[in-house]
Amino acid sequence: MTSRPTTAYQVTDRNLALELVRVTEAAAMAASHWTGRGQKNDADGAAVEAMRLAFDTVAIDGTVVIGEGEMDEAPMLFIGEKVGAGGPAMDIAVDPLEGTNLCAKNMPNALTVVALAEAGNFLHAPDVYMDKIVVGPDLPEGVVDLDASIGANLRELARAKRKDITELTLCALERERHEELIAKTREAGARVMLLSDGDVAAAIAACLPDGQVDIYAGSGGAPEGVLAAAAVRCVRGQMQGRLLFEDDEQIRRAREMDPGKDPSRKLSLFDMAKGDVLFSATGVTTGPLLRGIRRDGRRAVTHSIVMRSKSGTVRFVEGHHDFSTKTWPAY
């Protein structure tokens, strides 16, 4: 006699996915007060406060492993902070407002982002830079490699996608440190899409059919790298990373947070985010991935993406909110 699988755990996970959407929605609506006002710190602070309050209603025993910084650098949602109303032990990765400058300047692609996994399943890393490379699903394993030249990676990717290199688009942050990457990409014949900020959304775009991006590469924040890895896991893409250190103190902190491991090793996708992963993001300003907050008096409309690695399901959620019935004061 075979026993029927219990559905309680699955139902709880599905409910938890919706709870994560509520968390990113709350942060996005709070940040949207500051869109276009040129005050990025106020926008970030509003998102942090709203996200923290929203977490108080989520049935988890969560520990922030990717957050706003160390305890002495961030008053809330710092690395090591406990969140949640009680429940299963979970790792939390957050970026309460990815693209603070984008929000302040009312430019596209500002997001609020949360990822969740069972305790111990996210990379614990200090707030340093990370070198990253991301491609989408349905490609041969190892089609690109962080240690290969960008020209070699583009040639292999074009072969795997049955495209000419001239049809490929690489996305990267517009930074002086990426000048050689950009030049070599164009020299190989591929197009380049440059972003001022927002590499989590860019990594996701590289994995979606309509993302208009074939590969994301370059260095950005390690916290954003772990969040990107969580999203890439959910959509079956490929990603590699490596932490970049500026001094011995950063290396010491990395060793302390991830004991027994070489802090300079090449990180696989599963080194950064393993196990069952949930990911949610809500748009603050409109971009290629998500629409931004639309306000009308005491109401707002939100647009979010929520994903789960176990099922591979990607959902876009449109929320209609009446502020007169909301319990959080940060809207």
Image (cartoon, rainbow, N blue to C red):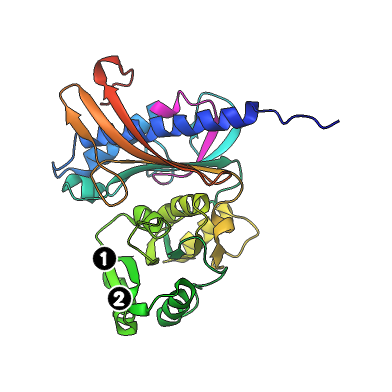
Q: Position of residue 90 (x, y in %)?
A: 57, 37
Label 2 vs label 1: CA separation?
9 Å
Residue lying at 38% horizontally and 53% vertically, measured from the top left: 200
Residue 145, above or below 298: below
Residue 138 to residue 320: above or below: below
In the image, taking residue 229 as reference, residue 99 lies left or right, namely: left
Q: Are marks 2 and 1 in contact (CB under 8 Å)?
A: yes
Q: Assess whether residue 60 is covered by the magenta stretch.
A: yes
Position of 65 with respect to 331 (left or right) is right
Q: Residue at x 65, y 28 (%)?
A: 7
Name the residue: 54% across, 55% down.
272
Q: Is residue 134 left or right of residue 329?
A: right
**Residue 250, image x and y in percent?**
47, 60
Does residue 325 appear to the left or right of 145 in the view shown?
left
In the rendered view of the protein, which quadrant contains the N terminus? top right
Residue 187 in the image: state x and y as whole percent: 30, 84
**Highlighted magenta segment, given as a residue range:** 54-69
Task: Tell me where residue 6 sits by quadrant.
Answer: top right
Can residue 67 be found in the magenta stretch? Answer: yes
- Secondary structure beneath label 1: strand
**In the rendered structure, which disc, 2 or 1, sits on the residue that comes first in sequence?**
2
